[in-house]
Amino acid sequence: MSFTPEAGTPLAAYYAETQPRTGAVLSRRSLGTLDAVTIGRYALTIGAADPCHYDAAAARSAGYADVVAPPNLLAAMVEWGVGTPEAELGSDGTPHDGEIPLGDGLRVMGAGEEMELHNPAVAGTTIVLETTLESITPKQTRAGTCVFVTTVNSFMSAEGAVLNRNRRTVVLLDPLEES
């Protein structure tokens, strides 16, 4: 059975505008070059004790070209920019014009994230992030009509080797009625 959001609602407008973009690359940008200090600091922050994250000699003896990043470092790097000025944020704290189309005024909730590790990221690797709109699926739930939006962040080296892919899903709902 096919389902679409109720006509005339902000969620229906968002779905009609965004659903045709399924499969499209939303953005592609460089996140910069990983360095050993960033890798070591991040590893220390999350409590990763493997010397391969701090010591180049230990990393080389384990078969890496240099210190190796903890697997979740790349996902954390996505948000490391300067950030969006408050005046450009929606009432829910999301940017009006971010890479992932979230719809102005819609309620946004996280619905899960999966990480697929392909290749290690080592110091000296230039990281490229490509974000793709994987799916947009309307559903009727106990909370009402929702749209589930899934994007895939593919982290690659500048040479094109896939390092990891993160699949992130958010749920969008119509704004709450003012009482």
Image (spheres, helix red, strand yellow):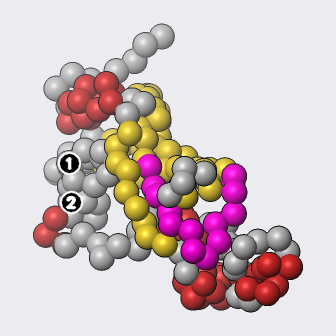
Q: Quadrant of residue 143?
A: top left
Residue that appears at 22% across and 53% down: 97
Q: Nearer the viewer, residue 84 or 119?
A: 119
In the image, residue 63 lies at what x, y percent?
A: 83, 71
- Circles 1, 2 touching at the beta carbon (< 8 Å): yes
Q: Residue at left 16%, top 51%?
A: 179
Instruction: Give amino acid for label 1.
Output: Asp
Give residue 125's quadrant in the image: bottom right
Q: Is residue 61 left or right of residue 138?
A: right
Q: Secondary structure at mark 1?
A: loop
The residue closer to the viewer here, 176 or 69, is: 69
User: What's the magenta region?
Assistant: 117-130
Q: Is residue 38 left or right of residue 64?
A: left
Q: Residue furthest top?
A: 1
* Left or right, residue 173 beside residue 139: left
Q: Position of residue 9 (x, y in %)?
A: 20, 31
Query: Residue 61 in the image: x percent, y percent?
Result: 86, 79
Residue at image location 54% in from the left, 50% down from the top: 160
- As drawn, 10 above or below 177: above
Report the residue marked by disc 1.
104
Instruction: Kindly identify which residue carries mark 2.
Output: 90
Mark 1 vs 2, N-terminal side: 2
Q: Is disc 2 surrounded by few (<14), some (14 to 19) or many (20+) residues within 10 Å?
A: some
> Residue 120 lies in magenta, yes or no?
yes
Q: Which mark is residue 76?
A: none
Name the residue: 25% across, 25% down.
Answer: 16
Give the vertical position of 17 relative to 103 (above or below): above
